[in-house]
Structure formats: C-alpha cells, structure tokens
C-alpha cells in the first residue's frame, strides 16, 4: 500500500512539473509572438508613412495634372459650333453684327431668321444651342454679388458729386444726365473723358474713352484745360479720346456698334463711352406722333447695343439728354426728360441738373437701384468740375 501511494505521488508530481513547463513555454512563445507582431506593425507603419520614390512621383504628377485640368480655360464657343449654321450663314450673321455666340443667344428667332436667311425652326435650334453653350440660367445672389465686385467707377472731380453717385459713374450700366442748356451736361462729359485716364488710385480707370458727339459740343481746347489742371500729359490725354461726329440717328447707332471692333480687334482699352446727346438726332428726325413707334423701336435697339457693350466689356456709359417743357404743369418743375419710358427704364442711374446761383450747379439723383435720392452742389470752373 505504501509503495502504491509513493508511485501515485510521484506520478502527480510529474504531471504538475509537466504542466508548469507547458505554461512557461506557452508564455514565452506568446511574448515572442507579441514582440514579432509589434515589430512588423512598426515596419508597416513606417512603410506606409514613407511611400516609395516612384509612388511619390506618380502622385505628384497626377495631382498637378488634375490641377492643370481644373484651371484649364474652356475655349470660347464659336458661331460655327451652332447647329444649322454654316460658313455662308456665319458671314451673314457677322455682317449684321452677330459676331459671337452671346449675340445669338439673346436674339429672337424672328430677327435671326430674317438676318441669316434661315427658317425660324433652325433659328430656334441655334438659339437654344447657344444658350446651352454659354450656360445662361439662374445664379445665386452670392454669385451676382461676386460679379458686381468687378464694377469700376470714374470720378466726376467733385467729392460731393461722387458721394451722391456712390463713388462715381459706374461701369456695367447706363447713366443718364438731363437738364436745360447750360446746366453742365457736356462739361461733365468732357471732364469724365479726362478723368477716366487717371490711375485707379486717383479715381480713374487708366483707360481710353469713346465720345459720340451728336450736337457738335465737343471742344478739344476744353480737354486741354482740364488735363493741364489735373497735371496730366496733354498729348497723351488727347490721343486716348476717340471722337466721332454723328449726323443722323442711323449714323449714331452705327458708331455705337463699331465700338466693339475697337475693343476686340484693335485692342483699345475702352473704359468709358459718352453719347452727347442721346436724343438730339432722334428728336429732329422723328417728329409727330405718327413716327413715335418707329423712333422708339430704333431707340430701344440702340440702348440695348450700349448696354451690351457695358456688360460684356465692363465699360461705363454716360448719356446726356435734352428736356422739354410741359405747359400743363402749374406747380413744381415743368421740365421733363425726353425719350420716353424706354430710355428712362433702361438707365440704371438718372441725374437731373439745374443751374444755381453764383455759377453753381445742383445735381439731383432721380433714380438708382440702390442709392437714395439726394442732391449735390458743384461748380464748373476753368479747371473743370470741382466742389462748390
């Protein structure tokens, strides 16, 4: 019995020793496995953090290619890209001053078919395709606000006058000045023709001017006086003002249409267009109520030509206008601008000028999309337009 007990105890001890060795071996192997996995993990992280040179080069090339493709400017669509518009039709369109896709996109099918000699169905397809190419549609108020940041302004020479106009004569819009003879309309026009050549930090646009004279009021001697008073090079100032004398309303409209050629083909940096005066020739050629409809249709087309130039080329447009006396008005001011609602609705800014005492002039802002009505007083002196 004693011998059996000893044998049993010996076997139990052997089992315990074996289990202990097994546990120790398992623990050692576990430690080795954890260390190995940790080392391999570190290697993997280092490898992923520092990619091979070839991979870096490829990634850089891909990113630069993507950036270049994003910054790549799309080619401007041409008239030849429109459906149903062949070389002969393109020539007809260009003769009628439809020189780009934008002019087709904003045209009516009836006008386009008459000018190009195509059916209205083809004209509608071309207009639709032109609008798709130019992505004409809705824009957010934020996008419109960003676009308006490109607007520039020309100083009048008077701080009070500029304050009334929100900084000066605004680009991308039409500004109408009307008043009696001697109220200062043409004087302001010639002052603007000089001031637009000033540097931007001095209230100018560092550009050239087109002056359409319909009443023979432009005087180069006056330009010299104003340029000398501003300390500018008179010869350079004179060369940057392109004057055209209009003799008929059709001639006036043709001159306005040719301004686009000056900007696009001759690369003249036109920043201001002056029409002095807007209605003088229309008023003399179309007398009586029987011709009123024809006159207003032509006037409307002329106004839209000027507005298109202002929008496409970021140009300021200054228009002078005559007035008429209304004998039926017994109280208040009996004078009113001519041209009718077509002209008045098209202009974003309307300013009424009148004479004051001691050589002063009073400018009253009649209409503006965002500025309040108000008045400013200025003087017309030998040096030009100055504060009163």
Image (cartoon, grey):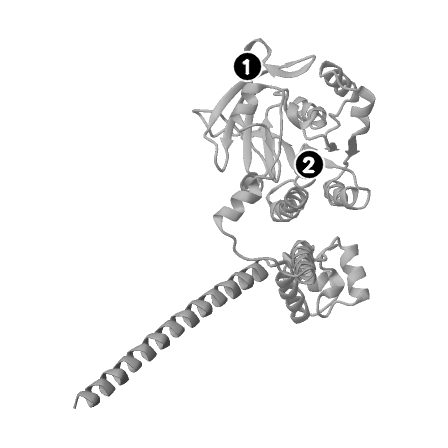
Residue 80: x and y, percent? 76, 64
Look at the image and tell me whether residue 213 can be seen: no
Mark 1: give few (<14), some (14-19) or many (20+) Cα within 10 Å. Answer: some
Give the secondary structure at mark 2. Answer: helix
Give the secondary structure at mark 1. Answer: loop
Residue 245 position by quadrant: top right
Position of 259 relative to 196 (above/below): below
Q: Check residue 130 in the rendering and tell me which mark sits there, or answer none.
A: none
- Pick the residue in front: 232 or 31: 31
The answer for how far apart the CA atoms under marks 2 and 1 are is 29 Å
Position of 104 relative to 204 (above/below): below
- The quadrant the C terminus occupies is top right
Position of 176 relative to 52 (above/below): above
Residue 317 position by quadrant: top right
Q: Residue furthest left?
A: 1
Q: Check residue 284 in the rendering and tell me which mark sits there, or answer none.
A: 2
Image position of 248 (left or right of 163): right
* Residue, disc 1: 356
> Residue drawn 81% across and 60% down?
91
> Residue drawn 75% across and 53% down?
97
Mark 2: give few (<14), some (14-19) or many (20+) Cα within 10 Å. Answer: few
- Pick the residue in front: 321 or 335: 321
> Residue drawn 48% across and 63% down?
38
Image position of 207 (left or right of 25): right
Look at the image and tell me whether residue 141 can be seen: yes
- Pick the residue in front: 53 or 347: 53
- The quadrant the N terminus occupies is bottom left
Residue 230: x and y, percent? 71, 16
Position of 34 relative to 314 (above/below): below
> Residue drawn 71% across and 66% down?
82
């Amino acid at each position: 019995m004693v011998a059996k007990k000893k044998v049993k105890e010996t076997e139990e001890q052997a089992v315990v020793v074996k289990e202990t060795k097994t546990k120790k071996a398992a623990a050692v192997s576990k430690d080795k496995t954890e260390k190995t996995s940790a080392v391999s993990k570190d290697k993997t992280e280092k490898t992923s953090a520092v990619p091979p040179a070839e991979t870096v080069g490829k990634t850089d090339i891909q990113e630069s290619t993507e950036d270049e493709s994003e910054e790549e400017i799309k080619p401007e669509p041409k008239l030849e890209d429109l459906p149903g518009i062949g070389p002969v039709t393109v020539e007809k369109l260009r003769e009628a001053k439809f020189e780009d896709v934008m002019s087709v996109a904003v045209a009516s099918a009836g006008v386009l078919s008459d000018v190009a000699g195509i059916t209205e169905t083809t004209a509608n397809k071309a207009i639709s395709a032109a609008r798709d190419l130019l992505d004409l549609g809705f824009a957010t108020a934020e996008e419109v606000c960003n676009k308006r940041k490109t607007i520039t302004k020309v100083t009048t020479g008077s701080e009070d006058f500029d304050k009334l106009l929100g900084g000066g004569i605004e680009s991308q819009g039409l500004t109408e000045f009307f008043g009696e003879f001697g109220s200062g309309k043409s004087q302001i026009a010639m002052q603007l023709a000089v001031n637009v050549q000033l540097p931007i930090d001095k209230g100018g646009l560092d550009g050239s001017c087109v002056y359409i004279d319909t009443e023979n009021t432009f005087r180069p001697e006056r330009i010299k006086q104003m340029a000398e008073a501003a300390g500018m090079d008179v010869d350079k100032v004179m060369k940057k003002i392109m004057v055209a004398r209009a003799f008929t309303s059709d001639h006036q409209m043709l001159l306005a249409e040719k301004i686009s050629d000056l900007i696009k083909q001759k690369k003249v940096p036109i920043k201001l267009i002056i029409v002095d005066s807007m209605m003088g020739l229309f008023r003399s050629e179309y007398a009586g109520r029987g011709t009123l409809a024809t006159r207003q249709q032509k006037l409307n087309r002329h106004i839209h030509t000027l507005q298109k130039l202002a929008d496409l080329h970021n140009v300021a447009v200054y228009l002078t206008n005559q007035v008429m006396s209304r004998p039926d008005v017994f109280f208040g001011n009996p004078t009113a601008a001519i041209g009718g609602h077509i002209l008045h609705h098209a202009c974003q800014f309307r300013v009424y000028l009148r004479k004051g005492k001691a050589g002063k002039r009073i400018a009253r802002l009649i209409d503006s999309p965002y500025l309040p009505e108000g008045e400013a007083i200025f003087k017309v002196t030998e040096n030009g337009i100055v504060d009163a």
